[in-house]
């Protein structure tokens, strides 16, 4: 699972490097790609996609849509509102990657 997470981070960094090539002063960050605020309203497609991909402990879900890729979401979920796991979610194709730690 750690190699998958590392590969995902590398892909995001490479994609971000290409995205921001014309704006050298902008440092690519999660906040740039998934701008706030966190959405907390119930989203059936994100919830179903997380469930279908084995996400556990997702009684509380917050999410942000990508500013670069329509239909791509950064979702965080928790069972207790204390420990949060992050997932990349693509509801249109029923795919999710994660969990990733928010450390």
Image (cartoon, grey):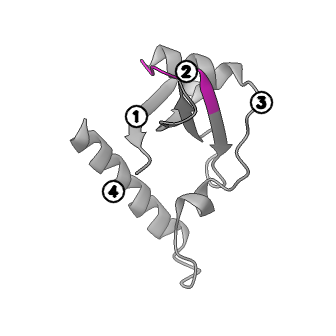
Q: Please tell me how crowded label 1 is: few (under 14), some (14-19), or many (20+) other residues with Cα within 10 Å.
A: many
Marks 4/3: CA distance? 31 Å
Please name the predominant secondary structure of the magenta segment in the image. Answer: loop
* C-beta proximity under 8 Å, tags 1 and 4: no
Q: Return the disc, 2 or 4, that comes first in the chain's sequence.
A: 4
Name the disc covering residue 10, or none: 4
Which residue corresponds to the image point at 61% horizontal and 63% vertical from the top-left? Answer: 32
Tell me which label, 2 or 1, sits earlier in the chain: 2
Q: CA distance from mark 3 to mark 1?
A: 21 Å
Residue 44's image quarter?
Answer: top right
| Badge 1 element | strand
Q: Are marks 4 and 3 in contact (CB under 8 Å)?
A: no
For label 4, the crowd category at 10 Å Cα-Cα, with few meaning under 14, some 14 to 19 and many 20 or more, is: few
Q: Position of residue 53 (x, y in %)?
A: 44, 19
- Number of the front mark, 3 or 1: 3
What SS does tag 4 mark?
helix
Q: Residue at x 62, y 26 (%)?
A: 60
The magenta stretch spans which residues?
54-61
Q: Secondary structure at mark 2?
A: helix
Q: Any mark on residue 36, and which? A: none
In percent of the image, x 36 and y 47: which residue is there? 8
> Mark 3 falls on what kind of element?
loop
Q: CA distance from mark 1 to mark 4?
A: 15 Å
Q: Nearer the viewer, residue 26 or 58?
A: 58
Q: How far, Cα to Cα, is label 3 from label 2?
A: 16 Å
* Residue identified by numbered label 2: 49
Q: Is residue 44 left or right of residue 84?
A: right
Residue named by callout 3: 41
Q: Earlier in the sequence, mark 4 or mark 3?
A: 4
């Amino acid at each position: 699972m750690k190699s998958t997470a590392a590969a995902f981070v590398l892909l995001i960094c490479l994609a971000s490097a290409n995205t921001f090539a014309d704006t050298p002063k902008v440092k690519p960050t999660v906040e740039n790609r998934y701008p706030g605020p966190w959405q907390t309203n119930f989203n059936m497609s994100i919830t179903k996609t997380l469930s279908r991909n084995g996400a556990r402990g997702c009684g509380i879900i917050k999410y942000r849509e990508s500013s670069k890729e329509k239909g791509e979401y950064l979702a965080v979920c928790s069972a207790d509102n204390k420990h949060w796991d992050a997932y990349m979610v693509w509801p249109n194709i029923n795919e999710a990657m994660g969990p990733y730690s928010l450390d």
